[in-house]
Amino acid sequence: MIRTIIFDCFGVLTSDGWLPFKRKYFGRGSQLESQVTDLNKQVDAGLSDYDEFITAVALLAAVPRVEAKAAIENNIANEELFTYITDELKPQYKIGLLSNAGANWIDELFKQHQTRLFDAVCLSCETGYVKPHEEAYLAAARSLGALPDECVFVDDQERYCTGARDVGMQAIHYKDYDQFRRELDKLLGSPKH
């Protein structure tokens, strides 16, 4: 029985500034793309400083630091999703947040009434586990007092959904709000919206 729903932050609960920046300046498969991906993983795991990360990727992209920081931090809350969580999910399920993040920006990204929806927040920079490492998902389930098979994990990247499935969670690859609602309603046995 599903008791908890765990959401990724960037690309689900908010827009994602980092991935478009990375694609624009570093493309796919290049040596620089590999280098900035490694830098991002280090900061997400809490092994390096976020401000140093911004400086490094700005230099590699050959753009002013302030421009890189503004683009990477362009994360806008998904108001439609938050309304659904507030009105329909929170009354029946525990709500978690699991994200690869270089720092705790939750209070900056979300309004206070939105942050209060989370029964647990697990950030890679605090746990030291970056998705898709299995311990990232297990830590989130534990923090919510749930077993993995009692959780649905929602992420905009399929490889992170695969990681959740590998530990026994249900997972939804988030593409847009309507697709997410259809898939979640099916998992929960809810009537069609």
Image: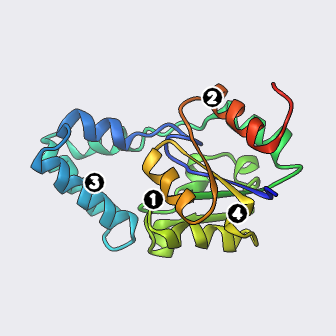
User: Which residue bears the numbered disc 4?
Assistant: 149
Point out residue 109 in the picture as x, y percentages from the top left corner: 56, 47
Q: Vertically, is 157 above or below 94?
A: above
Q: How far apart are marks 3 and 2 (CA)?
A: 33 Å
Q: Is residue 190 above or below residue 128?
A: above
Instruction: Point out the frontmost of discs 2 and 4.
Output: 4
Q: How far apart are marks 4 and 3 (CA)?
A: 37 Å
Could you tell me which quadrant the C terminus lies in?
top right
**From the viewer's perspective, is residue 47 above or below residue 153?**
below
Q: Residues within 10 Å of mark 1 (few under 14, many from 20)?
A: many
Q: Position of residue 150 (x, y in %)?
A: 75, 61
Residue denoted by label 3: 54
Under mark 3, the amino acid is Ile
Q: Mark 1 points at which residue?
A: 101
Mark 3 Cα shell of 10 Å, populated few (<14), some (14-19), many (≥20): many
Alpha carbon distance from label 2 to label 1 = 25 Å
- Residue under label 2, please give it: 179
